[in-house]
Image (tube, rainbow, N blue to C red):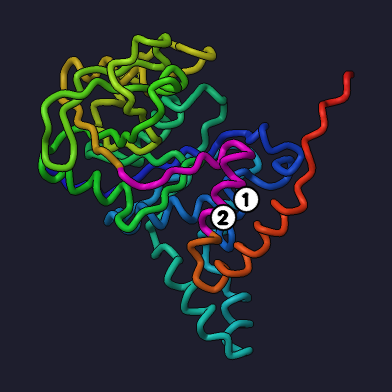
């Protein structure tokens, strides 16, 4: 059984929900407390033992490549000023030579197409996919738990967590079969099921470990919802030929692709920061005390 050594990060999205900020800054480079969103996701992959980080980019995303490159001038300045703590921290986050690869998704044809664009860099081995909008907060990283489950089963793994059953129609939902280690066998997948028809309340939270055969499926995959090539549609075909297992993630997930989720992530991670917690709590209390009733939106 081949190890999971590579991870794909689809970072070609336009970030239209954050305009005008994302006119010049990729949404993945917006900061949560002290790090860009993409750094949290890469750190999660590194904790899980990933050795090769593959970014599927688009136009105006060069700053992501720069972020993960060596910055000699900055390192030299920090060293000259004696800021050894900051320097060592940055070096710790720095991927090694040859550990990052970048490829382009020239046309925005969906998540499935973005994953397919990484096929030659992944090759014939299992790989992880991490959606960069979703950042996790837990003692053990979500992908680390998935890799552990993969090492037990040797098959495709999808991370899931619980949602309010009344909200299940908003997500991709999996059917739950026999238990296996820290997960279970997936009996089916439904994208945004009609209210009251969901097979469970376990939704797909943006982390996957897939076998390379998914590329053959994606190569001939027709467009689906939004006139895009959907990864879920390809997995629905592959599940007929290969087992899929669900990893039940127990931590917190923040959708930084939405302004509300982005704000929540900043609050959650700042409260988890030992040096910031007290000041942030006091700030939140002041804001709540001074909160005025929401005003109705003016008619256009």
The answer to whether the residues at label 1 and label 2 have Cβ atoms under 8 Å apart is yes
Name the residue: 42% across, 71% down: 92
- The answer to whether residue 103 is seen in the rendering is no
Give residue 86's position: percent from left, percent from top: 54, 78
- Figure check: 216 above or below 106: above
Where's the N terminus, which quadrant?
A: top left
In the visual, does 38 lie left or right of 150? Answer: right
Name the residue: 32% across, 47% down: 142
Q: Which residues are magenta?
A: 250-269
User: Between 232 and 260, which is closer to the camera in this rendering?
Assistant: 260
In the visual, does 2 lie left or right of 174? Answer: left
Give residue 201's position: percent from left, percent from top: 33, 25
**Earlier-in-chain disc, 1 versus 2:** 1
Residue 13: within the magenta? no
Give residue 233's position: percent from left, percent from top: 36, 16
Crowd rating for badge 2 (residues with CA inside 10 Å; few <14, some 14–19, many 20+): some
Q: Which mark is residue 267?
A: none
Res. 214 image quadrant: top left
Name the residue: 23% across, 32% down: 246
- The answer to whether residue 117 is seen in the rendering is yes
The residue that label 2 is drawn on is 36
Name the residue: 27% across, 37% down: 209
Res. 94 image quadrant: bottom left
- Figure check: 137 above or below 169: below
User: Between 293 and 68, which is closer to the camera in this rendering?
Assistant: 293
Res. 257 image quadrant: top right
In the visual, does 113 lie left or right of 74? Answer: left
Where's the C terminus, which quadrant?
A: top right
The residue that label 1 is drawn on is 30
- Figure check: 94 above or below 154: below
- Figure check: 101 above or below 255: below
Q: Secondary structure at mark 1?
A: loop
């Amino acid at each position: 059984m081949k190890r999971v050594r590579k991870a794909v990060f689809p970072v070609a999205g336009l970030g239209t929900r954050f305009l005008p900020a994302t006119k010049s800054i990729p949404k993945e480079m917006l900061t949560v407390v002290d790090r860009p969103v993409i750094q949290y996701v890469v750190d999660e992959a590194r904790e899980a033992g990933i050795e090769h980080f593959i970014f599927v980019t688009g136009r105006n995303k060069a700053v992501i490549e720069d972020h993960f490159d060596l910055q000699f001038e900055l390192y030299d300045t920090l060293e000259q000023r004696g800021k050894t703590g900051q320097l060592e921290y940055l070096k710790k986050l720095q991927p090694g030579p040859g550990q990052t690869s970048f490829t382009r998704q020239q046309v925005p044809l969906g998540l499935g197409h973005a994953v397919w664009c990484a096929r030659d860099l992944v090759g014939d081995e299992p790989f992880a996919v991490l959606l960069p909008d979703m950042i996790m907060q837990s003692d053990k990283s979500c992908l680390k738990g998935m890799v552990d489950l993969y090492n037990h089963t040797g098959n495709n793994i999808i991370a899931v967590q619980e949602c309010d059953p009344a909200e299940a129609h908003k997500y991709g939902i999996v059917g739950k079969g026999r238990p296996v280690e820290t997960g279970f066998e997936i009996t089916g997948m439904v994208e945004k099921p009609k209210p009251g028809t969901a097979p469970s309340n376990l939704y797909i939270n943006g982390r996957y470990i897939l076998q390379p055969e998914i590329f053959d499926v994606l190569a001939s995959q027709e467009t689906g919802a939004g006139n895009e090539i959907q990864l879920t549609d390809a997995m629905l075909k592959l599940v007929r030929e290969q087992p899929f297992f669900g990893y039940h993630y127990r931590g917190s997930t923040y959708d930084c692709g939405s302004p509300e989720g982005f704000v929540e992530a900043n609050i959650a991670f700042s409260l988890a920061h030992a040096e910031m917690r007290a000041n942030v709590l006091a700030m939140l209390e002041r804001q709540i005390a001074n909160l005025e009733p929401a005003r109705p939106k003016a008619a256009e």
